[in-house]
Structure formats: C-alpha cells, structure tokens
Image (cartoon, rainbow, N blue to C red):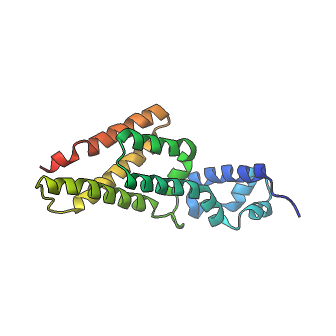
Amino acid sequence: MQYLKDEVRNRIMTVAIKEFQDRGFLHASMRAIANNAGVAIGNVYRYFKNKEDLFNEIVEPVYKLFLGIETIHKQEIYSFEEIVNDVMEVMKEYKSQLLIMVDKSTGTKYANFKEEITALAEKSIKDSIWPELQKKGIEVSDPFIFCVIASTFIEGLFIILRKCEEEETTKYLIRQLMILFFDNLEKRFE
C-alpha cells in the first residue's frame, strides 16, 4: 500500500485552485489538474474521490470560517474595525478559495454561497437597524429595503476583494464601504 504524501496532496490542491479559478467547477478538468501537478490521473483519485470532493476540500475551510464570523457577530456588537479585521484574516489565507466559491461554484453545493451571505447580512441589518428605527418612531414602509442594502453591500465587498491586491488598500476600501452603508444608517430613514 502506497502512503499518501502531504506534498503531493498539497501540490494537487494548489494546481486545482488555479484550475477552478480559471475554468470554474463545471469546466475544470481533473486530467488538467493531474498534468499540471505532475502526477498521474489515478494518483489524483487516490487523494480525492472525484472533482466535487477536491472542490469541497478547497472551499470548505473558508465556508466554515465565514459562517463562524457570522455566528460570532450574532452574539456581540462589533465595530467596523473588528469586522474588517475578521474579513481580512480570512482573505490573507483564503482569498482565492473565497472568490472561487463566490464566482466559480456553479454545479456545487456552494453555488448559492453569495446569496447565503447576503441573507445573513440582510438579517443582521434588519435585526440591528429596524428595532432602533421603531424605538424612534420611524416606520419602514417596505422591509425589502434591507435586502437591497445587504445585496448592494455584499456585491461592493466582493468587487473590492476581486480587484484589490494590497492588504492596506483592501482594508481601507472595506472600511469606507462599511461607513458608506452603515454609519448613521438609521438617520437616513428619518
């Protein structure tokens, strides 16, 4: 029995990340991954049952991290800076995987990840802003506006993450986006 080596497994995963970035899940080729990793196709299948298993192995850590951030933020009120820092920590290690999950996951169980994150953001905005508005006697005639705010914010966040390479620029732009969307948001409903 041949022992599976971490370095071969890691090389396959590194090459697979590039393949999924370039071609997306549906069009990615296990044969191309094997060739680019310098291993036989049969060897790839010793490490991963199939393309879906390989894809899941690549994106699952970032998926769990994002859900973890959401869980933490449900329990406490965080500052813009803390949220930006949490997002940046994920980005340092998993930027490629996150963008693959958002942009290239059609045909996988992660295909709706962006919608999931948007729904979580909508719920968070609604849960934090709406009670404040009601306390002040401000009515929101259609709560769908929270969906619009969340969708637009999430899209802006991913535009920044796709286009910015430098960490400080990314942090600055995310912070500015958060201020634009959420600083004194309740006053805009008055």
Q: Where is residue 147 in the image (x, y as percent from the top left)?
A: 28, 59
At x 16% / y 57%, what residue is drawn?
Answer: 134
Quarter of the image with the N terminus in it: bottom right
Q: Which residue is outermost to the right?
A: 1
Q: Position of residue 141 (x, y in %)?
A: 14, 62
Left or right of residue 34, residue 184 in this image: left
Left or right of residue 45, residue 165 in this image: left
Query: Considering depth in this image, is 127 or 43 the residue closer to the camera?
Result: 127
Q: Position of residue 160 (x, y in %)?
A: 41, 42
Query: Considering depth in this image, is 35 or 61 the residue closer to the camera?
Result: 61
Q: Say if residue 122 shows up in the picture.
A: yes
Q: In which quarter of the image is residue 29?
A: bottom right
Q: Say if residue 28 shows up in the picture.
A: no
Query: Considering depth in this image, is 165 or 2 the residue closer to the camera?
Result: 2
At x 79% / y 60%, what residue is drawn?
Answer: 43
Q: How many labels does the image show?
A: 0
At x 74% / y 56%, what residue is drawn?
Answer: 34
At x 35% / y 41%, what residue is drawn?
Answer: 80
Q: Where is residue 170 in the image (x, y as percent from the top left)?
A: 44, 37
Left or right of residue 184, residue 78 in this image: right
Left or right of residue 81, residue 49 in this image: right
